[in-house]
């Protein structure tokens, strides 16, 4: 099976250079609303509820300024995602207690657990790459973020 890449589930139109949100719920809503306009039949209320329910089990703020909120939904045909950057930081109750600057949102159909896990792994691998977070922080806009994601996807 080919390796899952960031741009397999985060499309060009699903990147936000500067989140307006100042808290976790608003950030999730902003990203979910972005996906609503990109996917036919997508139920944003259902997605937001699933993400908030998942957050109650434990924060998806994984540290180093990164959060990976994720949930599974009934009516999706494939794994979809969005990315948002906050220049001011958002309190996600991250494991390291630090604010979150990068939010990778992931939504999957219930019947695609393997792709869901591979997509989470893909995000983790990108975040661990040397300088990925520095480049994401310094990106001048969506175009730079897209180029960074493309570069990550080309890595072996």
Image (cartoon, helix red, strand yellow):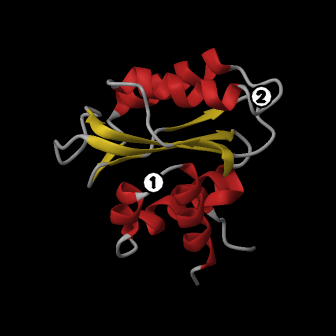
Quarter the C terminus occupies: bottom right
Q: State left or right for residue 119 relative to residue 17.
A: right
Q: Which residue is mark 1?
A: 140
Sequence-wise, the earlier of marks 1 and 2 is: 2
Quarter the N terminus occupies: bottom right
Looking at the image, is 125 positioned above or below residue 95? below
Residue closest to the far left: 97
Q: State left or right for residue 150 relative to residue 125.
A: right
Give the image location of residue 58, x and y in percent. Answer: 32, 35
Residue 93 lies in quadrant: top left
Residue closest to the far bottom: 156
Give the image location of residue 80, x and y in percent. Answer: 68, 43
Helix, strand, or loop for circle 2? loop
- Residue at (53% x, 65% y) in the render: 148
Give the image location of residue 61, x and y in percent. Answer: 32, 43
Q: State left or right for residue 11 relative to residue 52.
A: right
Nearest the eye: 93 or 50? 93
Q: Which residue is mark 2?
A: 75
- Whole-angstrom CA distance, mark 1 to mark 2, is 35 Å
- Residue at (35% x, 76% y) in the render: 130
Looking at the image, is 70 positioned above or below residue 118? above
Helix, strand, or loop for circle 1? loop
């Amino acid at each position: 099976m080919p390796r899952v890449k960031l741009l397999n589930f985060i499309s060009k139109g699903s990147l936000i250079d500067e989140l307006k949100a100042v808290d976790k719920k608003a950030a999730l809503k902003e990203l979910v609303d972005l996906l609503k306009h990109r996917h036919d039949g997508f139920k944003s209320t259902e997605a937001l509820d699933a993400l908030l329910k998942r957050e109650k089990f434990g924060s998806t703020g994984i540290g180093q300024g990164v959060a990976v909120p994720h949930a599974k939904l009934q009516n999706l045909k494939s794994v979809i995602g969005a990315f948002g950057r906050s220049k001011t930081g958002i309190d996600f109750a991250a494991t390291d207690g630090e604010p979150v600057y990068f939010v990778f949102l992931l939504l999957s159909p219930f019947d695609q657990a393997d792709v869901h896990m591979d997509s989470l792994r893909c995000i983790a691998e990108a975040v661990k790459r040397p300088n990925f977070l520095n480049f994401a922080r310094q990106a001048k806009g969506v175009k730079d973020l897209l180029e960074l994601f493309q570069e990550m996807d080309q890595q072996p």
